[in-house]
Image (cartoon, rainbow, N blue to C red):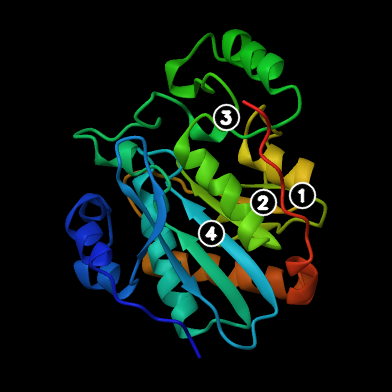
Amino acid sequence: MFFIAVSPYGAWGCTDIYAKLPAVSTALCQAAQLQPSGARSVQGRAILVRDLAPADAQRRVLVVATMHGDELTAASVALHWLQLAQAAPAQTHWRFIPVLNPDGLARPKPWRMNAHGVDLNRNFPTPNWQRETKVYWEQRTRKDPRRWPGPSPLSEPEAKYLFDEIGRFAPQLIVSIHAPYGVLDFDGPVLPPTRLGRLYLDQVGVFPGSLGNYSGLQRGIPVVTVELPNALRAPSSDEIARMWRDLSLWMDKTLPLPLQQAQNARAPTAPAQ
């Protein structure tokens, strides 16, 4: 049995920023039945979410996409995967956040950052955040504005929402969908998948303030980072299905833990600002 609710936000999203997504029809978007999470972006846009919670769920998996607003195909794949999850939930409580950064996506020309100009994937509270993110941004990126970590960890409402959601939902796995590097990355305490569809494992390391660093290394919650080959051209439907199938097979092999263990995980505490 599934919890299904109808909300005007789903239709609103499908005729607004979600209409920009490649390979996403209005019917597919509306079938996702996205709901307001209660969180809003810097500019006040609702961050939409969808839960699929079968009664026999044995694990929790959080799927988050378009953390960077110019990675349109990430949200497209998330919506197609949501459709596949509806057809075969596989004893998994799924929580999908197809667009974490609606302000970046909504711009006439979508951009990576949120409305404050912050790279959300550098805004999570990893150790020595103030020093390490500053050094990395100034020395490694040469103050690239596209990778500015922000003034403090969790300074951005979108990053704070995801941080809080990890605490509330206590997932056993986070799947973070990005583009356009065409690789499969992984952070966490279990054996990673070696491939998803045509994407092969290439662990590129961790960055100060990144979700992989915070969740995979600091919290011990595995993060599979899917880097699609193109930010504007979506994979074929066959490739999307192959990636989903490979992810499901790896989950069945690697994440057999019962749901109760995930529920007992201690929720994090937000750092002092």
Q: How far separated are the C-alphas under marks 1 and 4?
A: 16 Å
Q: Of callouts 2 and 4, which one flags the residue occurring earlier in the amino acid sequence?
A: 4
Q: How far separated are the C-alphas under marks 3 and 4?
A: 18 Å
Residue 249: x, y in percent?
A: 67, 74
Looking at this view, name the residue that lies furthest to the front.
272
Q: Of callouts 3 and 4, which one flags the residue occurring earlier in the amino acid sequence?
A: 4
Task: Identify the residue at image location x=39%, y=54%.
Answer: 75
Q: How far separated are the C-alphas under marks 2 and 4?
A: 10 Å
According to the image, label 2 marks what residue? 223
In the rendered image, the vertical position of residue 260 relative to residue 209, given as above or below: below
Residue 144: x, y in percent?
A: 47, 15
According to the image, label 4 marks what residue? 63
In the rendered image, the vertical position of residue 144 relative to residue 212, given as above or below: above
According to the image, label 3 marks what residue? 122
Task: Identify the residue at image location x=54%, y=41%.
Answer: 160
According to the image, label 1 marks what residue? 188
- The crowding category of the residue bearing disc 4, from other C-alpha atoms within 10 Å (few below 14, some 14 to 19, many at least 20), is many
